[in-house]
Amino acid sequence: MALLSRGQTLFIDGGSTNVAIAKAIPRDLELTIATNSLGVASALSDHPLVELTMLGGRFVRDLGTCVGADTLAAIAQLGADLFFLGSCGLDASRGVTAFDSAEAEVKRAMAKNSAGIVIAVTNDKLATAAPYRVAGADAIRHLVVEKTAPAAILADFERQGAEIHFA
């Protein structure tokens, strides 16, 4: 994972793509990771060099994540080099969006306390939007996409400052 380097602090949001990212983190890489996702925490639970912080709060089974005041309070105490944001929708004009208001609030807090946002997204989420805004497209530092992602859509994100990576 070229985006990661020894000693970084990361927020990793929920979602199946971010669970896959957590599983792919090299076992010889020392990181500090904070997550509100039970799946991400489980994927990293036996990683020998990851200092893992679970951002507790009210657990929402449908989301697989913790949300609410306790989660927000825990996020407020941390700062991250990168935030791996799980997006429900990603559009160059509407930005990053979510389907749940409490989930969007947690994502916004992580984004605010991070130096950069990374989003790994499948083609079916590109040029789509959910009701709750998380961040503008210009907040995305790294966009990880499929090799078959539409070039015109990617160009819109590049114009707004995102570095495109192909998975």
Image: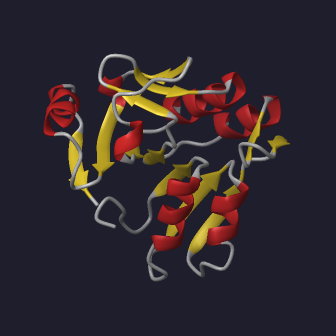
Displayed quadrant of residue 40 = bottom right
Residue situated furthest right in the rendering: 58
User: Looking at the picture, how far across and down is residue 28, in whole percent?
Assistant: 45, 82
- Above or below for 59 versus 90: below
Q: Determine the residue positioned at 46% across, 31% down.
A: 89
Picture coordinates of residue 56, whole percent (x, y): 79, 46
Residue 3, percent from left and from top: 32, 59
State left or right for residue 125 relative to residue 80.
Answer: left
What residue is rendered at 21% in x and 32% in y?
Answer: 153
Q: Nearer the viewer, residue 63 or 115?
A: 63
Any part of residue 27 in sight: yes
Image colouring: secondary structure
Q: Which residue is more in the foreground, 143 or 5?
A: 143
Question: How many marks overall?
Answer: 0
Q: Is residue 115 above or below residue 18?
A: above
The x, y position of residue 83, in whole percent, is 47, 45
Q: Is residue 117 visible?
A: no
In this rendering, position of residue 26 left or right of residue 99: left
Left-right relation of 66 to 78: right
For image coordinates 59% across by 29% down, the residue present is: 109
Q: Within the image, what quadrant is residue 126 found in?
A: top left
Looking at the image, residue 16 lies above or below residue 46: above
Residue sitting at x 69%, y 57%: 53
Q: Locate the N terminus and report the quarter of the image it occupies.
A: bottom left
Q: Quadrant of the C terminus?
A: bottom left
